[in-house]
Image: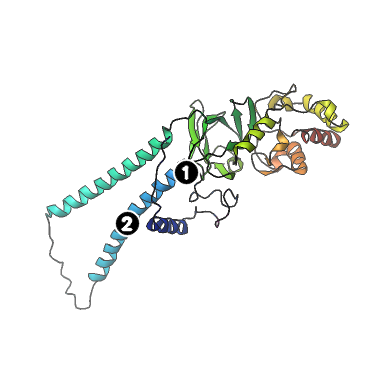
């Protein structure tokens, strides 16, 4: 796989610092790799595609910034040099026409600048979109829903939701993760700024992207395409793990849900309620009769740090509120409120808490 190299000189770093200080998108102050407080900064790339995009952005900024400084400098110089003076007689200065050299310069130079920018951008786009898929690549199918993310790990025969787990990639021996992007309803956009650029999920039009994170940690992202009422709460969480940790996570995800014999009476009653209500029309729990596909797979619900696509932490109180009144957390979500008694809610929550 080919990777792009960019300027790491003192001048290059100075330019990056200026861009960070000037841009409102630079994020919070520096922190440890994978720190959630800084993981949305496009200026701290942790993956080859994001690094390539940053390099292109800095190159474009350098050229356009130089043009701005030259033009602004000439304007300021002209405004000061030829300003109206007290002894001006008001006559129009001599008009000069037909400078072939000047006209040729302001025609050829902009054309050359546009050609250079086009070729540079095309090179980066080609390097990202046409990258070879190595044999050791991890493959995940991402499906965007209103308003959550589905992740299908076909290589390992399981499905999960909202929190994407991928292995770290050693730059010396890259093991990238290739993502096939699908949409179940409307347009979405997959964007984790530190890992890759925005890539749209369009109904009936499969798309692809890839990442090769070089640092373990948590990386945050966002659906970057307005997709409805709760677009702003369709969040992305990418957990980059060491190969050993990722393999352990995969092994745990391949397990089925606990059987009744492993539950207390309240949780067993909750399972009966879950399987006897509309829950199973939307959700799947491996090893049970629940095989719905409209909502997230709940087989390992309690192994996730958040619920409702990152909207709130995955705590027993939030889980109960989410089941009882979804609009209290995510107004406009497609999950219906379950009209159960308080006792049945407690039993259902007790069952869901066993799904590790």
In this view, 196 is above or below 255: below
With 305 as the anchor, is 12 left or right in this view?
Answer: left
Residue at the extreme bottom of the image, as rendered: 87
Q: Nearer the viewer, residue 22 or 186?
A: 22
Q: Mark 1 points at which residue?
A: 50
Residue that protrudes farthest toward the right in the picture: 265
Residue 187 in the figure: left or right of residue 297: left
- Does residue 162 show up magenta in the picture? no
Give the number of the disc on residue 66. Answer: 2
Which mark, residue 124? none
Q: In this view, does 37 lie above or below 261?
A: below
**In the figure, 291 relative to 93: above or below?**
above
Q: Identify the image quadrant of residue 3.
A: top left
Label 1 vs 2, first from the N-terminus: 1
The front one of 155 and 136 is: 136
Asked if residue 191 lies left or right of residue 301, the reply is: left
Q: Where does the image place residue 244, in percent across and percent down from the top left?
A: 63, 37
Residue at 78% x, 25% y is 275
Label total for image: 2
Residue 289, how many percent across, how many down? 74, 21
Query: If the image is split into quadrants, where does the C terminus sit?
Result: top right
Q: Is residue 290 visible?
A: yes
Compute the Cα span from label 1 to label 2: 24 Å
Q: Can residue 162 be seen in this view?
A: no
The magenta span reads: 28-33
- Mark 2 Cα within 10 Å, few/some/many (few <14, many 20+)? few
Instruction: State the SS at label 2.
Output: helix
Residue 119 vs residue 100, the one in the foreground = 119
Q: Is mark 1 on a helix, strand or loop?
A: helix
């Amino acid at each position: 796989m080919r990777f792009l190299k960019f300027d790491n000189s003192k001048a290059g770093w100075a330019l990056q610092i200026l861009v960070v200080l000037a841009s409102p998108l630079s994020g919070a102050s520096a922190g440890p790799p994978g720190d959630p407080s800084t993981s949305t900064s496009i200026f701290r790339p942790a993956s080859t595609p994001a690094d390539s995009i940053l390099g292109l952005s800095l190159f474009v900024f350098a050229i356009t910034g130089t043009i701005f400084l030259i033009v602004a400098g000439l304007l300021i110089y002209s405004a000061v040099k030829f300003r109206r003076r007290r002894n001006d007689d008001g006559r129009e200065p001599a008009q000069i026409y037909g400078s072939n050299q000047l006209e040729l310069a302001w025609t050829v130079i902009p054309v050359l600048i546009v050609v250079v920018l086009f070729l540079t951008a095309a090179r980066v786009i080609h390097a990202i979109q046409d990258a070879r898929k190595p044999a050791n690549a991890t493959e995940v199918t991402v499906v965007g829903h209103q308003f959550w993310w589905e992740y299908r790990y076909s290589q390992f025969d399981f499905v999960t939701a909202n929190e994407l787990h991928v292995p770290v990639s050693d730059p010396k021996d890259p093991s990238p993760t290739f993502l096939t992007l699908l949409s179940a309803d409307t347009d979405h956009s997959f964007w984790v700024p530190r890992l890759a650029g925005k890539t749209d999920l369009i109904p009936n039009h499969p798309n692809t992207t890839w990442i090769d994170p070089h640092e373990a940690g948590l990386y945050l992202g966002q659906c970057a395409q307005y997709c409805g009422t709760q677009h702003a709460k369709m969040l992305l969480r990418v957990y980059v793990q060491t190969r050993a940790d990722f393999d352990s996570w995969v092994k745990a995800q391949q397990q089925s849900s606990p059987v009744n014999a492993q539950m207390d009476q309240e949780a067993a009653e909750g399972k009966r309620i879950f399987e006897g209500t509309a829950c199973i029309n939307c959700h799947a729990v491996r090893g049970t009769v629940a095989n719905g596909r409209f909502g997230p797979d709940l087989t390992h619900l309690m192994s996730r740090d958040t619920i409702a696509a990152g909207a709130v932490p995955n705590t027993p109180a939030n889980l109960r509120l989410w089941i009882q009144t979804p609009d209290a957390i995510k107004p406009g979500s497609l999950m219906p409120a379950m009209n159960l008694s308080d006792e049945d809610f407690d039993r259902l929550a007790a069952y869901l808490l066993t799904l590790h």
